[in-house]
Image (spheres, rainbow, N blue to C red):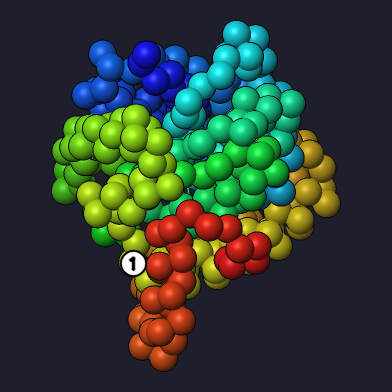
Amino acid sequence: MKPSILVLYYTQTGQLRNILDSIMSDITSVADIDYVSVEPVKPFPFPWKTVPFFDAMPETVQHIPIEIKPLPKEVMDKNYDLVIFGYQPWFLNPSQPITALLKGEFAKVFNNKPVITVIGCRNMWLHAQEKVKEYLEAANARLVGNIVLNDTNGNLVSLLTVIRWSFKGQKEASGMLPAAGVQDKDIFEAKRFGGTILKHLKEDNLINLQRDLQAQGAVNLLPGLVILERRGIKNFRKWAKFIREKGGPGDPNRIGRLLLFKRLLTVAVFILSPISSLTASIQLIINKNSLLKDVDYFKQLQFEKGRL
Ligand SMILES: Cc1cc2nc3c(=O)[nH]c(=O)nc-3n(C[C@H](O)[C@H](O)[C@H](O)COP(=O)(O)O)c2cc1C
């Protein structure tokens, strides 16, 4: 009998669906695959306008769930052999639709199932994955794999292109800047993971899956990222609390604080970021061993609370 796989995901621009399609492309005829997307009741607009974009930060960081459409009953009841769970980080946390799924009644879909997470992002995903691990554990799922596809351009270039993409909707290259998002070549080559997943599933050997996915380059991670995410998440938490003192999503009373956050984030990203990278490099030399341990940890699947 063909193994049955649920591919569950959220995507705003379609990038994550493209990644998942590529991963599954070589195994579509040999597995029974259901694709199900998580849909917010009130979709997030794309391209974004400035205020709604920054207005999404506090609730994303504080994991306040939005309303999502119910997952189909037949999907909830079906006994899948594997769930492939595609998501993206927003503000260093799972995107709002994903948090809503993980915190709500439909998280039961993960109960007692092996899960592979697939992340499509700019380049900062560590904290989001720690949160997803925690929710999956609470949902009685077994994390058996993680595949990360990110934009491999330098930090500044990926920032400029993601801004062009998010606010103008333009993904294509223009002027000196390349196309935004995960490179097409990397999306195409993600098809190499499908066969590995199927092999482990058929041999009932999912316990060794991540080792083999990693050997195929499923997770590439620079140690400096650990330092930058640790710094970033602390600041986001403070700002989320500060902004929410003025009201909930869409409350005009909080626009002043949102715009202040936007200004400071812009300064942090474009002016402080090079300095921050320099201090991170120094920290890297001083704390090399402990950071290399961190890198090993983040490439693996185990969950230790408070690691980031
Ligand atoms: C509101 C928002 C915040 C984002 N924050 C991050 C982030 O913290 N780290 C990151 O690597 N990418 C971040 N991204 C990029 C997304 O992870 C993702 O790559 C992009 O939105 C395309 O995903 P899609 O499949 O939903 O279209 C963010 C995108 C949005 C819209």
Q: Residue at x 62, y 25 (%)?
A: 109
Q: Residue at x 43, y 19 (%)?
A: 4
Report whether 101 appears left or right of 179. Answer: right
Q: Quadrant of the C terminus?
A: bottom right
| Element on which disc 1 rests | loop
Residue position for label 1: 222
Q: In the rendered view, tell whether residue 134 sits above or below residue 181.
A: below
Return the x and y of residue 212 as percentages of the image width and height. 29, 49
Q: In the rendered view, tell whether residue 197 sits above or below residue 42.
A: below
Return the x and y of residue 142 as percentages of the image width and height. 55, 42
Residue 203, picture quadrant: top left
Residue 98, picture quadrant: top right
Q: Quadrant of the N terminus?
A: top left
Task: Answer whether residue 78 is visible to the viewer in this image.
Answer: yes
Given the current orientation, which residue lies at the most extreme bottom position?
286
Of residues 122 and 215, the one nearer the viewer is 215
**Circle 1 crowding by C-alpha within 10 Å: few under 14, some 14–19, many from 20:** few
> How many marks overall?
1
Q: Type of residue at label 1?
A: Leu
Taking the image in four quarters, ligand 1 sits in the one at: top left
